[in-house]
Amino acid sequence: MSALITGLGVVSALGSGVEAFAAGLASGVNACARHEFTLFGGQKISAPAYMAVPADAKGLIEPRKLRRMDRLIRMCAVSARQALKQAALDPSTFDASRLGVVFGTAYGALGTTQEFVDSWLKNGERHASPLAFMSSVHGIIASQIALDIGAIGVNLTLAQRDISFEAALATALDLLEQGKADALLVGGGDELTSMLHEFASHFRYVERGPVSGADPWARRGRIVPGDGAAVLLLEREGTPRKALARVDRASVGRCDLPRADALLPLLAGMDSRSIDLITTSRAGTARSARLDAAREAALDSALGQELPKLSHRGNFGNFATADALQAVANVLMLQGQIFAPLAAGKPRSDLVAGLKPPRRILHDAASITGNHAAYIVSVL
């Protein structure tokens, strides 16, 4: 089943709001900068990262509600409100039982999780903070969004590492097809904390040197982390609201080897020649380079043609649910904007030379866990 995208919301290193995000992509803003992280021993280090700007909640969420939201939840909740505002959907006039939230996150609210563990270690198990525990579970994201907007419909949070957003999208399409909701806020979000950065540093997984930024086409690079959140408002066909694009299909499956097999169900019954652009979760690291190349060759084989391939992680950083931001970029490209991806801070204009605004985009996400996810979005 397909669904209509009627609203977008995003909080990222490029800005808070779709307009700021689009402007940053269009002008090639390099949002990578050095940030300070505190190690477990108390030492402080400086390392490059794409940290999201503060979520601008003015006119969207009441200050009294914001006080109960940590940084990650605030980014997600503000993105959800932005999507509702763009779609002109007022939750107070919508059937609350038919409005739901499906969110993807790999790590959840890590800052609050560390706060809870610290209180446990400091005060003992019987005196650990119950408030911190409640806010540390992954499901708190979808719950807080629903509480903010008054939605009492479907409420789910999915965690499937680096395809968590795609899993949320595929689940949302199923729920709409089953008639479980009329409108769903579907998003992805994660936050970069000192704890997460230190863990990754121990495995030499993250870049600690230059601040030029991520390069999705590098073969020897390391992750330049980032964070943020993005939300799509999905509605069933027939909505009175203006649609920005359509999600044709989405799937999540197992793909232990970089083969085209996992894509076949997604492409079944579809003229693959109608797809004119591929976006990927290409990270540009030594670990992912071989998988990236093999996956892209498999894509060309499955589609019977070689198509342009883009990844905008050089614009907003590598993190588990970065594909939620890529989804927003994909919808904007379907509306006629083409964004040259950044690679180490420089625009790769050659990748979009002669590229016309796409009418159907296939997004391919190959997870390091061996899972595979993909979706197709198109113009109306």
Image (tube, rainbow, N blue to C red):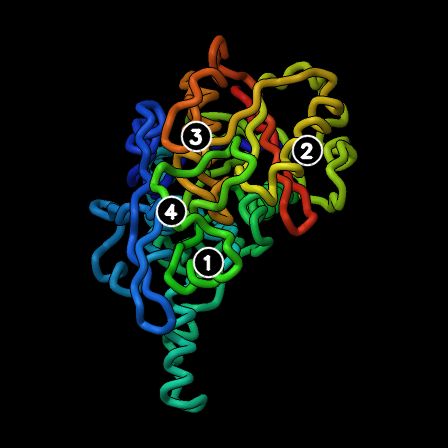
- Quarter of the image that includes the N terminus: top right
Provide the secondary structure element on which disc 3 rests. Answer: strand
Comes first in the chain, label 3 or label 2: 2
- Circle 2 sits on which residue? 295
Residue in the picture at 38% in, 78% down? 118
Q: Are marks 4 and 2 in contact (CB under 8 Å)?
A: no
Q: Are marks 3 and 4 in contact (CB under 8 Å)?
A: no
Under mark 2, the amino acid is Arg
How far separated are the C-alphas under marks 1 and 3?
A: 22 Å
- Circle 3 sits on which residue? 343
Residue in the picture at 41% in, 84% down? 121
Crowd around label 4: few <14 · some 14–19 · many ≥20 (10 Å)? few
Q: Are marks 1 and 3 in contact (CB under 8 Å)?
A: no
- Circle 1 sits on which residue? 201
Choose mark 4 or mark 2, whichever is in front: 4
Res 67 → quadrant: bottom left
Using the image as rendered, state which of residue 84 and residue 263 is in the foreground: 263
Comes first in the chain, label 2 or label 1: 1
Under mark 3, the amino acid is Ala
Give the label on residue 14, or none.
none
200 relative to 247, above or below:
below
